Amino acid sequence: MLRSLGVAHLLPSADTTLVSWWLHCRQQLDIASREQFDSIVLLVSWTLWKERNNRTFDRSSRGPLELLGGLCRELDDWVQAGFTSVSVLGASLSQHLASM
């Protein structure tokens, strides 16, 4: 996702925590981009949390492409609800999925 948005330099290292990575990345972005970045981090975290619950409680799991498709649907729902700052991500993910 970060690569498709042109911010691959923000990819986390293996030895960092989510919170420290998130805070460090926010400092590297201009103020206008922080809202979009925060929304992306929350959206991905929410999608992974729901997948974790499905695997734990429903004993069902989705593959990477299915997860990405679910993330895109969730993203569409967020945009419909008024989180328009993530609409750029929706276009990038749609292009990425189409190329796979």
Image (cartoon, helix red, strand yellow):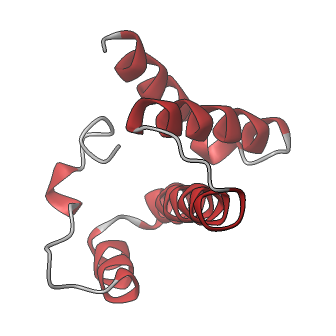
100 sits to left or right of 75: left
Residue 51 vertical placement versus 96 (above, below): below
Residue 28 vertical placement versus 21 (above, below): above
- Residue at 63%, 56% in the rendered image: 59
Coordinates of residue 50 in the picture (x, y in percent) = 65, 59
- Name the residue at the top extreme: 98
Residue 47 vertical placement versus 30 (above, below): above
Coordinates of residue 25 in the picture (x, y in percent) = 30, 73
Locate the C terminus and report the quarter of the image it occupies: top left
Q: Which of 19 and 61 is in front in this view?
A: 61
- Name the residue at the front extreme: 59
Q: Which of 82 and 58 is in front in this view?
A: 58
- Residue at 59%, 56% in the rendered image: 51
Q: Nearer the viewer, residue 16 or 81?
A: 16
Locate the N terminus and report the quarter of the image it occupies: top left
- Residue at 67%, 32% in the rendered image: 73
Residue 19 vertical placement versus 47 (above, below): below
54 sits to left or right of 10: right
- Residue at 46%, 67% in the rendered image: 31
89 sits to left or right of 77: left
45 sits to left or right of 54: left
Coordinates of residue 67 in the picture (x, y in percent) = 51, 40
Coordinates of residue 9 in the picture (x, y in percent) = 14, 57
